Image (cartoon, rainbow, N blue to C red):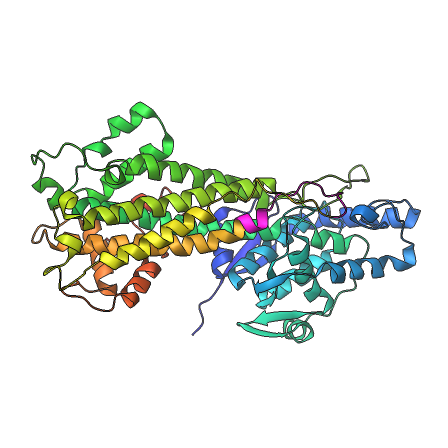
């Protein structure tokens, strides 16, 4: 029995992060706010008036890029737009997954519907119909430098509208004409400027960065929960989470994280059991969770603000301003804001994994943690969590390389007409691999911390943390002796990338509410 999808009304310029997250997860059908139609039609009329009067305007009746000085006769304008799509469909690599493609399609619809692109309403309606029918263009992942728009990947999206190339329906790749027929639409003959409007824009890099944000929020939440579990496992001090410390510094993310950890641990018997233990200081990976994870949270929030703006932006070129009848060439296709947002997301995702791996290593060091070596009885004959930590170290180290900023790179294109580019598309694309790695690292930490907590029984943690502990035990059993751990690690990677967390953490996340976490 299929789940009924929510209806999402796209109001161009005002689509929320929560709505974009729903689109990413695939539980919506889309409709366009009818108030957007007037601006779309006025912009289209402006384009048609230019063609009718014979004015020469870039992107409407000229060549493109370095060929912008070449004027195209009216009887070749449809051919010009078709050739543009075909010549730019040069992507390589694996197809982007459907969750990302849904965001690409939705943000392209939003951009075109801002009323600055000059396309017919029919183009937007066709995209909406295909989205709602589950017909996804096959978009290769490689081939965009993130300036003059995501040209190659967006050309592959546009092929679908022409009835060219392949599409994917329910995971099966089929010829585009077959997919259009399933959706009940005919191939389009693109009018003046429509091909360029479809190809120009930052929608692919933005969609990939939004995936990084949404998955990054999950690993942030998991990392914070794992850190609280580790604190309980080693019987660490809660004094560094005192609100007065964080108010004295004033960093918002830090204040919020410290408050969330206090909420997670409220009512813990383990905390109460060692109030007078004499422990002065824990290692930084425990003591500085608010400072490190708070800084990560600040980065997530900043990136979220930038990406919400970009997902709602008119980012093709040139732009139509129908109130004055002008078509103005600029550079909104340059994805530098997305590249920077992706780079700071990469830093946050890498650091969430880096500090998690250090807490894991701490728990395995009996001299620091007070726990059995490698968290297993009869060490020697049993290696316990020794090599699970090696896997975590490998993944955390890989993320260090992946975190190198993409935005500092540029290679000129189009015979040096496009002489500085953002590389936003790669900067955003690598976030998927980084989130995969970090989900595994924090999952391994949480599995080890649950193991460590068992050595404090019969003492119990807080009601919230005991619920988390129970969720982990439903996935993996206590390690009484060595066994095959790879399946357990995969289960915990899935835990690290899950979407249901205590309210104290959910309230921190920039894209809004998650499914209920039952305490």
Farthest-out residue, top: 248
Q: Position of residue 414 (x, y in %)?
A: 75, 48
Point 64% across, 73% down: residue:
179
User: Considering only vertical position in the picture, is 239 above or below 271?
Assistant: above
The part of the chain drawn in magenta is 414-427
Residue farthest to the front, as pictured: 380
Give whichever of 411, 26 is nearer the camera: 411
Nearer to me, 444 or 399: 399
- Residue 513 visible, this orientation: no
Residue 504 in sight here = yes
- The structure residue drawn at horizontal position 75% and vertical position 56%, both measured from the top left corner, is 195
Let me know if residue 416 is in the magenta part: yes
Displayed quadrant of residue 269: top left
When asked about the image quadrant of residue 136, the answer is bottom right
Q: Quick check: 182 above or below 41? A: below
Number of marks: 0
Q: Residue 419 appears at what percent x and percent y?
A: 71, 41
Q: Could you say which quadrant of the image residue 2 lies in?
A: bottom left
Between 196 and 50, the one lying in front of the other is: 196
Across and down, in percent, residue 123 comes to 71, 59
Q: Quadrant of the N terminus?
A: bottom left
Q: Is residue 261 magenta?
A: no
**What residue appears at the point 37 percent right and 35 percent down from the top-left corner?**
253
Query: Percent position (x, y) of residue 204?
Result: 60, 53
Q: Magenta span: helix, strand or loop, mainly?
A: loop
Q: Is residue 414 left or right of residue 184?
A: right
């Amino acid at each position: 029995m299929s789940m009924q999808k929510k209806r999402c009304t796209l109001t161009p310029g005002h689509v929320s992060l929560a709505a974009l997250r729903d689109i990413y997860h695939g539980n919506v059908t889309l409709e366009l706010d009818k108030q957007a139609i007037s601006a779309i039609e006025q912009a289209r009329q402006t384009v048609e008036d230019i063609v009718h009067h014979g004015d020469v305007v870039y992107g409407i009746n000229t060549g493109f890029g370095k060929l912008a000085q070449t004027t195209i006769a009216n009887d070749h304008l449809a051919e010009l737009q078709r050739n543009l799509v075909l010549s730019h469909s040069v992507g390589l690599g694996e197809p982007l997954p459907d969750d990302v493609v849904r965001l690409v399609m939705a943000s392209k619809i939003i951009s075109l519907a801002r009323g600055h692109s000059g396309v017919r309403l029919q183009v937007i309606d066709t995209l909406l119909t295909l989205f709602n029918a589950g017909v996804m263009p096959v978009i290769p992942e490689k081939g965009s430098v993130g300036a003059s728009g995501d040209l190659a990947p967006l050309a592959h999206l546009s092929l679908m509208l022409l009835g060219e190339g392949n599409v994917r329906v329910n995971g099966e790749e089929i010829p585009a004409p077959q997919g259009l027929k399933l959706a009940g639409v005919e191939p389009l003959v693109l009018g003046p400027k429509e091909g360029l409007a479809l190809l120009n824009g930052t929608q692919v890099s933005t969609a990939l960065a939004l995936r990084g944000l949404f998955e990054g929020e999950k690993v942030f939440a998991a990392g914070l929960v794992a850190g609280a579990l580790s604190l309980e496992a080693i019987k660490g001090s809660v004094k560094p989470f005192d609100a007065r410390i964080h108010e004295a510094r004033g960093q918002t993310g830090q204040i919020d994280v410290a408050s969330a950890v206090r909420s997670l641990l409220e009512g813990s018997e383990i905390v109460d059991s060692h109030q007078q233990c004499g422990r002065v200081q824990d290692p930084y990976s425990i003591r500085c969770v608010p400072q490190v994870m708070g800084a990560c949270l600040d980065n997530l929030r900043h990136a979220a603000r930038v990406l919400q703006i970009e997902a709602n932006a008119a980012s093709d070129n040139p732009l139509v301003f129908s109130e004055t009848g002008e078509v103005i060439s600029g550079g909104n296709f340059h994805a530098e804001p997305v590249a920077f947002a992706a780079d700071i997301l990469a830093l946050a995702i890498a650091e969430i994994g880096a500090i998690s791996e250090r807490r894991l290593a701490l728990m395995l060091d009996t001299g620091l943690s007070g726990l059995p070596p490698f968290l297993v009885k009869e060490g020697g004959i049993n290696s316990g969590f020794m090599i699970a930590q090696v896997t975590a170290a490998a993944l955390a180290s890989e993320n260090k390389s992946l975190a190198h900023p993409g935005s500092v790179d540029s290679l000129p294109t189009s015979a040096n007409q496009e002489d500085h580019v953002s590389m936003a598309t790669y900067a955003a694309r690598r976030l998927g691999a980084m989130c995969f790695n970090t989900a595994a690292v924090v999952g391994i930490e949480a599995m080890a911390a649950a193991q460590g907590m068992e050595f404090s029984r019969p003492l119990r943690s807080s009601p919230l943390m005991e619920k988390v502990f129970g969720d982990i035990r439903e996935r993996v059993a206590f390690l009484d002796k060595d066994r095959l751990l790879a399946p357990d690690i995969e289960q915990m990677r899935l835990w690290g990338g899950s979407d249901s967390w205590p309210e104290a953490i959910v309230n921190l996340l920039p894209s809004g509410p998650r499914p209920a976490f039952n305490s």
